């Protein structure tokens, strides 16, 4: 009786479908309950995938320090700064994408930096191969969005310290950091920071074996900023040092 068999098969297929649906609903509900999923995140995921205006979209750029240019600091045994910056940039990027952010990983002197307008820019570097320990975070000294830059820096400091348990290195931030080239190249509206993850010498162990924690700290810091960033107080471009171009005289 082939018809009867078909009928039974149909009933079982329907049950299987309903069961799968119920499991899906249950799993989604559980994710929301545990806080691993939220409407915010669903919205950002949808925004990233569809690119529809109106849906929230986070755009993040991460510079893998020295990539495409040189090795950065090097230890006598050959451990290079760029190996660490690239690995941490890749890991942080994946973590941010899982939060629904659209992430670009850039070279040190990437062409895309010119006029780059994103919600957050972070450049990842590592200090020299000397026997010191600690990390540093700074933003550009010349900025028209000081509140946003400061918030990004403080979020990164807190999250990175929590994830890695590294101390903040007390040495004053150098001009290399506050005058960092990328800050001058991106759009005025782009909040930016630079982090020195640690010292290639004294922090070698975590720099080589603890890249997951470092990336988590970096990603958490960026998410902290994106979730709580202060409103951009639109400072008119005319308040800068650049004089306005004098009006061209009309035809006489
Ligand atoms: Zn560097």
Image (spheres, rainbow, N blue to C red):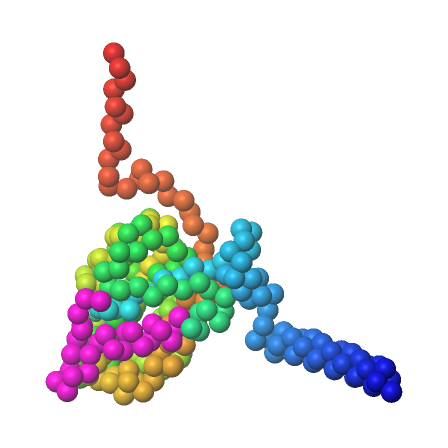
Q: Quadrant of the C terminus?
A: top left
Residue 160 at least partly seen: no
Quarter of the rendering occupied by the N terminus: bottom right
Residue 218 image point, x, y percent: 38, 72
Tell me the quadrant of ligand 1.
bottom left
Q: Position of residue 230 (x, y in %)?
A: 45, 55
230 left or right of 130 in image:
right
Residue 242 in magenta stretch: no
Measured as percent of width and height from the top left, residue 8 is found at: 83, 84
In the figure, 201 relative to 251: above or below? below
Residue 155: x percent and y percent?
40, 67
The residue positioned 15% from the left and 87% from the top of the image is: 77
Magenta region includes residue 92: yes
Q: Can I make out residue 106 in this image?
A: yes
Q: Residue at x 36, y 40 (%)?
A: 236
Q: Residue at x 46, y 69 (%)?
A: 97
**The furthest residue to the top:** 252
Q: Which residues are magenta?
A: 68-93
Q: Is residue 79 left or right of residue 4?
A: left
């Amino acid at each position: 009786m082939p018809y009867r068999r078909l009928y039974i098969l149909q009933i079982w297929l329907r049950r299987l479908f309903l069961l799968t649906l119920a499991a899906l609903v249950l799993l989604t509900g559980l994710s929301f309950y545990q806080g691993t999923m939220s409407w915010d995140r669903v919205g950002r995921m949808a925004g990233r995938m569809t690119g529809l205006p109106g849906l929230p979209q986070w755009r993040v750029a991460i510079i893998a320090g020295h990539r495409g240019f040189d090795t950065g600091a090097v230890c006598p045994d050959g451990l290079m700064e760029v190996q660490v910056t690239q690995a941490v940039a890749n890991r942080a990027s994946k973590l941010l994408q899982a939060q629904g952010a659209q992430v670009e990983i850039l070279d040190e002197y990437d062409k895309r930096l010119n006029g780059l307008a994103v919600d957050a820019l972070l450049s990842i570097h590592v200090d020299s191969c000397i026997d010191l320990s600690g990390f540093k975070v700074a933003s550009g000294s010349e900025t028209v969005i000081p509140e946003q830059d400061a918030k990004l820096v403080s979020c990164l400091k807190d999250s990175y310290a929590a994830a890695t348990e590294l101390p903040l290195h007390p040495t004053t931030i150098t001009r290399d950091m506050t005058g960092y080239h990328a800050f001058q190249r991106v759009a005025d509206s782009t909040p930016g920071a630079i982090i020195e993850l640690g010292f290639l010498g004294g922090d070698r162990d975590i720099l080589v074996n603890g890249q997951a924690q470092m990336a988590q700290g970096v990603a958490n810091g960026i998410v902290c900023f994106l979730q709580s960033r202060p409103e951009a107080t639109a400072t008119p471009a005319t308040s800068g040092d650049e004089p306005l171009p004098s009006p061209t005289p009309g035809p006489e």
